[in-house]
Structure formats: structure tokens, C-alpha cells
Image: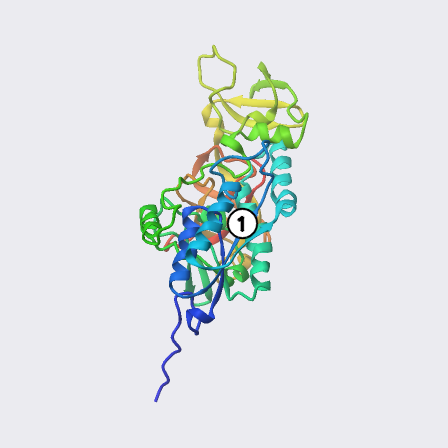
Amino acid sequence: MALDAPKLNSLGFTKPPSETRVVVAMSGGVDSSVVAAQLAEEGYDVVGVTLQLYDHGAALAKKGACCAGIDIHDARRVAEDMGFPHYVLDYENIFKDAVIDEFADSYLAGATPVPCIRCNERVKFKDLLETARDLDADCMATGHYIQRKMGAHGPELHSAEDANRDQSYFLFSTTPEQLDYLRFPLGHLPSKDATRELAARYGLQVADKPDSQDICFVPNGNYASVIEKLRPGAAEPGEIVHADGRVLGTHDGVIHYTIGQRRGLGIGGLSDPLYVVRLDVDAKQVIVGPKEMLSTRVIPVREINWLGDTAFTSQSEWHVAVKVRSTRPPREAIIRPLSATEAEVELLTPEEGVSPGQACVFYATDSSRILGGGWIWRG
């Protein structure tokens, strides 16, 4: 007579929730608060952890940003209401070394960095995950909108059910080892409204709290002002130059411009619209040109994290879909591996405004699975 398979709890363990410890990464927002409240209600041994990531002084503080002072207070209040322990960990130095400094240096080098990815990769899913292990937790749960599904070769990363909330672009660098330990309880929800309904059901005071829109340490999305604080004197003036060599004007610093920018160039009076097509940091030049110069078909990618079932270099070509910006839909592409961590990505349809410093994330064409991704490193 065949034995029945052991029953799994909702987090995938063969033991009761009360004997399953889970560390919940709590930002103080509605998403992670709902995760913590839901798991506590289900009877899990929940431990809430909030990271203090940066200085909350006047220079960088921003109401509504992830992990600002008010958010730490909100996370603590949820833990008190739901009856589980909550800890605040000072990760300020780790965050500065692993995320903020690279953000500043990358921006000064003419790239358009995505610090949220580095934060997940180097802080939340590295140092915080190790802290969770030190607390003898069986797993760590977050409020990210992404799905973890079991496949034939182990856990797989899949896009969220709600495409409008999907955060897969920011989580492509999650490794198989991290994925084995992580849980994402919100990824299957149909909408953000469903999350807020759960928050109301649990009586959470953050149920109507607005989502943070900006990078946590960049008030009002003003990257240049933060760079100037982090790297005084970095904004050196230079020339705005047409791709054909004509000098069209001057600028107050390359850091004020991004690839694909059209507005605010300060070079009015021209008959045809011009866009920023390249930033030459060494020459202190902003190079502008017609829109067609933004079109890119071949993208060099490095620091690749591969989540496929077979080795990245086991095939000469991978036919996938890729995202080159978080706000754009995946487009069909061919990946040609150059090594285990480098590749050339050919877009079947050219994209505009592909920028060094952005991520290129790989998606399966026949399912919701994320196959990994890497960093675009030159335009």
C-alpha cells in the first residue's frame, strides 16, 4: 500500500505553521504588512524585520519613501497589532557601500542605474537573508509582486498574476539558492485592490497608505540633486553637441541628462526635435540627434544571472523575450552567450532609448517564467 505524501503547509514545509518560523521583510508599506499579518493569522512563527537603510536627516529624508522614519513606525505598529516580534536593523553602512555609492558613480559615468535591483541583490536577499538564517527561520517572505513556483528542477521565478504590479524586472538577479529560501505570498493576487482589501480585513492602519513611487533615497525623483550631495562638484558644465559635430549650446552637468531625453535640453529654435543619444562624460558633452539614432537592435549584457534549467552556455542561442526597461513590455529577442555571465542580445524589433546601467531581463516565450537577466553596459 502506497504511503500518502506528507502534507505541506502554505509555505511548502511538512510541519504545522506554529513550528515554521518565517522572517518577514517589512518596509512599513501595505504590501509587506499584509504578508506579515496573513502569515501571523495562519499561525506561523512570524518575526518582522525592518531595515534602516539611509540617513533620515534633511538631506535625503522623504515622506512616503521606503524605510523612512514613519515607515519604521508603521511596521512596528503592525507587529504590535498582530502580536509578533519586530526588529529594526541598522543597515545604513551596508546600504551606502552596496547601493548608494555605486548609484552615484554609475550616474557620474553616464549610465542610468537601477538601485532597487542592487538593493534586492546585495542587501535584502543577501545580508537580510543571512540574518533570517541566523534567527533560525525556515524561510524569508517579502511583499514583492512575483511568484515562486515549483518546477521539475526546483523552484522557479514567475511573473506576478497582475501584470500591472509585476516586479520581476527588479528581481532578475535572485539566485537559485536565494529562491529556495524566499517566499512571495502576494504574487498570485489579481490586483493591488485585493491587497488593500486584505489589509482592511486584518484591521491594518496602513490599508490606505499610498505606494512609494520614487527610489527611497531620491526625494521627488531628483537624481541630480542627490548626486551633487553625494559627490560635491560633480556637476561640471560642458557643451551640448549635435551628432554631426555642431555645438548647439551649453549645459550645467552631464548628470542632468538621460538617454532618450527630449524636453529641457535648452536648445530651442531648431526645426526638428532632438533627443539625447549619448553622454560623453570624459569630454563633458551631451550628444543629441534625431529620434532614429535612439534605435538599438544589439545590446551587450554582462553580470548575467541565469535561472534556466540547463547551463547558459549549453546553447549557442536562446529564443526569449526581454525587457530593457521596467515600464516596457517584453519583446522577442535572441540571446547569444559569450560566457557564463556575458552575452549579446539581439532584439527582433529595435528599441529606443536603451541605456547603459539599465537591466535586460529574460522571459520565457511560452510561460510566465523569468529566465534571469543581466546589465546593459554600453549603448
Q: Which residue is located at x 61 percent, y 18 percent?
A: 239
| Viewer-proximal residue among 133 and 168 | 133
Give x and y (percent) for residue 342.
58, 49
Q: Is residue 214 visible?
A: yes
Residue at the disc numbered 1: 120
Q: Quadrant of residue 349?
A: top left
Compared to residue 352, the image places residue 151 above or below, namely below
For the C terminus, the image quarter is top right
| Viewer-proximal residue among 257 and 10 | 10
Give the residue type at disc 1. Asn
Under circle 1, the secondary element is: helix
Give x and y (percent) for residue 209.
39, 41
Q: Quadrant of residue 326?
A: top left
Q: Left or right of 205: which side holds 51?
A: right
Compared to residue 205, the image places residue 213 above or below, namely above
Give x and y (percent) for residue 302.
58, 47
For the N terminus, the image quarter is bottom left
Q: Left or right of 134: which side holds 22?
A: left
| Viewer-proximal residue among 141 and 19 | 19
| Viewer-proximal residue among 85 and 181 | 85
